[in-house]
Amino acid sequence: MTALEDAPVPLSAAGNPIGFGRMHRKEDVRFLRGEGNYVDDVQLPGMLYGAILRSPYAHARINGIDTSAAEALPGVKAVITGAVLETLGLAWMPTLSYDTQAVLATDKVRFQGQEVAFVVAESKYIARDALELIDVDYEPLPAVADAKKALDADAPVIRDDKEGKTDNHIYDWEAGNKEETDAAFANAEVVVTEDILYPRVHPAPMETCGSVAHMDPTTGKLKLWTTTQAPHAHRTVYALVAGLPEQNIQVISPDIGGGFGNKVPIYPGYVCSIVGSIVTGKPVKWMEDRAENLMSTGFARDYHMKVSIASTREGKIQAVKVDVLADHGAFNGVAQPTKYPAGFFHIFTGSYDYPAAYCNVTAVYTNKAPGGVAYACSFRITEAVYAIERIVDCLAAELKMDSAELRLKNLLRPEQFPYTTPTGWEYDSGDYEKTMRVAMDMAGYDQLRAEQAEKRARGEYMGIGISFFTEGVGAGPRKHMDILGLGMADGCDLRVHPTGKAQVRLSVQSQGQGHETTFAQIVAHELGIPPEDIEVIHGDTDNTPFGLGTYGSRSTPVSGAAAALVARKVRDKARLIAAAALECAPDDLEWELGRWYVKGDPERGRTIQEIAMDAHGALELPEGVEGHLDAQVVYNPPNLTYPYGCYICVVDVDPGTGQVKVRRFIAVDDCGPRINPMIVEGQVHGGLADGIGMALMELIAFDDDGNNLGGSFMDYLLPTAMECPDWELGETVTPSPHHPIGAKGVGESATVGSPAAVVNAVIDAISPFGVRHADMPLTPANVWRAIQGSPVRT
Ligand code: CDP
């Protein structure tokens, strides 16, 4: 029960809470009937279909491309190569990290699955058939698939397209204080170091990426339906790259079947569909298939981390340092704030109180697909949380101390908030110990440890894993954060119609998180208009205010704040209009949900619906008050919000087969007040399943030649209900002091926090075999090898 649920929630005539509460999702009416409108549902008269020819090699020179046979195939309308794009100045495009990426390869291919040619045809079958007829003269080159070899003197240079580039180095970046941290380590009683890999995984949304481009030859207007999490940012980049006037580009992001960061970058296929439409004068649809999605679009993680922790013998942490080798693939396609090339990785200091921390990150190119997207996490926070939560468990093992006790000893205390970390972040609010105690109580922690001891005595291997995580979400303050020079503020418009029904326009875009419901609830909470009377409009650059989109759980912290503030602006205007109607001074009025009334005379009042009619009607408005009832805001967040949580996982491991069974999972999240607790729980359920997937089975693997070994769901394993236990969820509520409704983001908390809990549980289970660490994914084979003492190969 949250504090908000304890309070009586007024219900609308339709039975929905007017404000926060467990309202059923408005969007489900169409989703459950199969009536969603996804990019692949878009059908336009005369539409043509595109298909991409991809490289079979991870690294090869292109000596020539013969497209004549493909062009001769009946039904083929155009075959576009890098050479064609070069004539338009479009062979290369900027990435969201100030790198460049080939739209279609010209000189070389640099990863297996790279885009080489684009066929436009009357049907998608003809387009795919034509791919077989394109003859590419490849000269294979040695490939680098292992980041650790990318900086070797004899490593082939991948990005020789960049003038003067003689190695595969991308950037070095650091945070924290090296001298203080080194000194703390030099004087420490106990130091533990571990090499920890967060392997390459893929967001794998159910809907793959695609677009429908229609460049109207008459008006010169480009309409692009596309699977993007950031329609406005994409429109601006298209305008800058292609030189098209921005007002002539309309980016529409219709219903999206999951994003998880995979739909933040601009992919070559989007650009090719636009060029295809320009060349043919017809609309062109391009939808990738599953293998294309897994092999070529934004991957996540691929962080090789050497993590060290220093502490006293009693377990007081004194310092942490992390040395990261970041594998960015062939193009640095990461989307993250410009100032932070390694994202928000420096939140690796975690939820603990210690003075010194330092990290450095070296990023390299390899012959793998580009990406490094924030897969359901705010810019590398998952990697950071995994690093600190694994090393704390390694320290507990070294000290022979219970891992819960070690955490409780070091957690930040409530009076320390707002807390500035040794790497410079300001955590807004928290009561960490309370949250941890709730989780331990729910789990029956002491009984679990007793059960574990009994089982060990009879040769059964049960493990208990804890993860306590802090995230920083809601990017972000304009003075610190931009992507490609675009500030990360969000706009919001609210229009109340004469009859008191409303439309709210957002700059963020839902990919299944329920924004059509929760944003209506935010406005309902502020204005008292029933949420079913409020339409949420998003995902169309012609009809919504500018903003940088949805990723990194930023919708509630940034756009949610904008929605609350725009409603308050409307409420303030409504007060002036109500005062005119009631013939009193605005200061004489008091607000109750949905109505202004005269102080001391509650019968005399105007409902928000009556005020809306007054605002549009014949009522004489006071000087300076414009008619109509609408407002607009741009919200520039003063800080990130810092949700946190404590997760406890219980596993049973069969040492004979290495099979892991997740028996219980307790997740206590604190994301401040919950606008819709049911939606929050759904977000947490999904994220926990994600965490089990990454911890136990997901991996995009490559052989030494750079061949992708995980290009289908036969190889890239995702968790199903079979692998997931009944989630046991709890909550604490610590509002963010700077957010208008105190809400923190939550969409990614569970993905961020859960992998460490699962891995900690598995390692705890097999620790009697002397195992202190093994890398994800902890497949049966890897667990078995760890037990046998052989190094775990991922
Ligand atoms: O940016 P994204 O929508 O992916 O993440 P989010 O802002 O954390 O929100 C995910 C969903 O949970 C949205 O529908 C939010 O409105 C909802 N939510 C909530 O009901 N209460 C919160 N305190 C945070 C999010």
Image (spheres, helix red, strand yellow):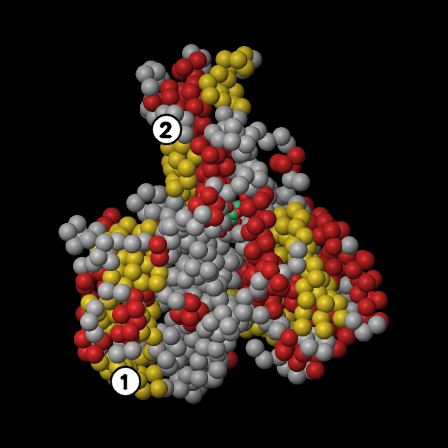
Query: Residue 383 placed where, x, y %?
Result: 56, 65
Q: Note whether residue 615 is visible.
A: yes
The residue at label 2 has a CB less than 8 Å from ligand 1: no
User: Which residue in the structure is indicated by mark 1?
Assistant: 137
The residue at label 1 has a CB less than 8 Å from ligand 1: no
Quadrant assignment, res 576: top left
Q: Nearer the viewer, residue 553 or 181?
A: 553
User: Which residue in the structure is indicated by mark 2?
Assistant: 497
Quadrant assignment, res 503: top left
Tell me the residue at 35%/57% (across/down).
Answer: 40
Q: Nearer the viewer, residue 263 or 715?
A: 715
Where does the C terminus fall, quadrant-wise? bottom right
Query: Residue 34 placed where, x, y %?
Result: 43, 50
Where does the N terminus fall, quadrant-wise? top right
Give the residue furthest to the left: 218
Query: Residue 348 placed where, x, y %?
Result: 58, 62
Tell me the residue at 36%/86% (across/down).
Answer: 141
Q: Is residue 290 left or right of residue 792?
A: left
Query: Residue 586 placed where, x, y %?
Result: 45, 18
Task: Name the amino acid, label 2.
Answer: His
Q: Which mark is residue 648?
A: none
Q: Note whether residue 357 is visible.
A: no
The secondary structure type at the circle numbered 1 is strand
Task: Name the amino acid, label 1.
Answer: Asp
Q: Is residue 100 above or below residue 551?
A: below
Q: Is residue 780 above or below residue 319?
A: below
Mark earlier in primary sequence (2, 1): 1
The secondary structure type at the circle numbered 2 is loop
Q: Is residue 711 above or below residue 689?
A: below
Q: How far, Cα to Cα, is label 2 from label 1?
A: 63 Å
